[in-house]
Image (cartoon, rainbow, N blue to C red):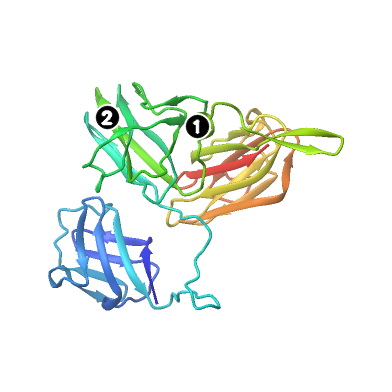
Amino acid sequence: MAKILIQNYAFDASEKTITLVDYAAITLENVLLVTNVTDNVIIYNFADHTLGGSVATNVLTLLYDTALMDDTDKLQIFYNDPAQDLPFNSDGRLQTSNLPAIASAVTGNIEAIGGTVFANVARYSNVMAHCYGTFNTVACTFEGSLNSTNGTDGNWFAIQAARSSTNTVETATGNLSAAPAYAWEMSVNALTYMRVRCTARTSGTQSWVLSLGSYATEPIPALQSHAVTLTTTTVGGSATVVGFGQFRNVALSNTDVTVKATAGRVYSWYFKNPDATHAAWVHFYNATIANVTVGTTIPVWSVEVPANGTNEYVFVVPMSFATAITIAATSSEAHDVSTAPTTALVAFVGYI
């Protein structure tokens, strides 16, 4: 039996019910804790009789009155799954994975000067941030804290963010009146919380998504004082090898995008599908975007990204593209389908 964090659930606030979608039946004694993360309120606690509930099949009915909450509120649900056995090695020690953690993206809206969207980054090394929505003249700063306990209290200071599209490093977005064609990457090693904070606003709603990464990417390439090269010495001479490029897109959909506009090789990829119900497909094209029509052009390779899952791969021998590297995401593996995924994907591609 192992304590797990439930990701797939349905919340009906007016009925005070939570359905654990992946289970045919659950037991009350195995439900440990439920917190409404959006409202920062505990709504079920096995150790508190005032925060109890009852169970029928896979539905938990709460004692707590959630009528004023929203069905879309984000919940943190811990459950003791009797089918999940903890793995132990031959020495009797708990065996842990060497893969980095993958966290759900943090989302929020800014609708007033002083408004914030924040994330607990104590266990993460970098953050990709992107904004969208309908708004006018909104400016935000990027900030970090070493002693905040909830994203609001504590002392805060400016941190540097690098644009995903250029080697531009900044501590603020500047005035924006539409979603920019780029995101920002920040190193958050040793911080407890980071946030974006609104310093100017005329009107509208600016929505933010913060994607948390535990991969060691420090320092951010744009923050380095010079390009990174690897130099090796061989018998009779020396050679300089340029490190592979990193393509990032936090909203990959059925509009084709350029990974590399000329011939190249793909060494790795990481795709994440936030949609809990529908799978998606990423298609690779050996052509420039001017010569790609999603739904018509036949891709040279396609990979499935499962619902609420990831697809990641590192090549021993890279995949070569003689013309260019272009990708897009659709809802089907078929090359003649151009329908966008239900939810845009997060995409990272390593290439030369």
266 left or right, relative to 208: right
Mark 1 and mark 2: Cα distance apart in space: 21 Å
Residue 256: in sight, yes or no?
yes
Q: What is the x, y in percent for residue 53?
A: 19, 72
Residue at the far right: name it: 236
Asked which quadrant contains residue 243, the reply is top right
- Above or below residue 72? Residue 222 is above
Identify the secondary structure beneath mark 1: loop
Disc assigned to residue 164: 1
Amino acid type, residue under disc 2 in the picture: Cys
| Nearer-the-camera pick, 137 or 48 | 48
- Above or below residue 93? Residue 268 is above
Please name the residue shown 26% across and 76% down the image.
28
Q: What is the x, y in percent for residue 16?
A: 19, 63
Q: What is the x, y in percent for residue 207?
A: 33, 36
Disc assigned to residue 198: 2
Q: What is the x, y in percent for residue 63?
A: 15, 68
| Nearer-the-camera pick, 285 or 113 | 113
326 left or right, relative to 310: right
Please name the residue shown 33% across and 21% down the image.
175
| Nearer-the-camera pick, 129 or 62 | 129
Within 10 angstroms of label 1, few (less than 14), some, or many (20 or more) residues? many
- Above or below residue 96? Residue 255 is above
| Quarter containing the C terminus | top right
Identify the secondary structure beneath mark 2: strand
Within 10 angstroms of label 2, few (less than 14), some, or many (20 or more) residues? many
Asked which quadrant contains residue 235, the reply is top right
Asked which quadrant contains residue 139, the reply is top left
Q: Earlier in the sequence, mark 1 or mark 2?
A: 1
Amino acid type, residue under disc 1 in the picture: Ser
| Nearer-the-camera pick, 186 or 218 | 218
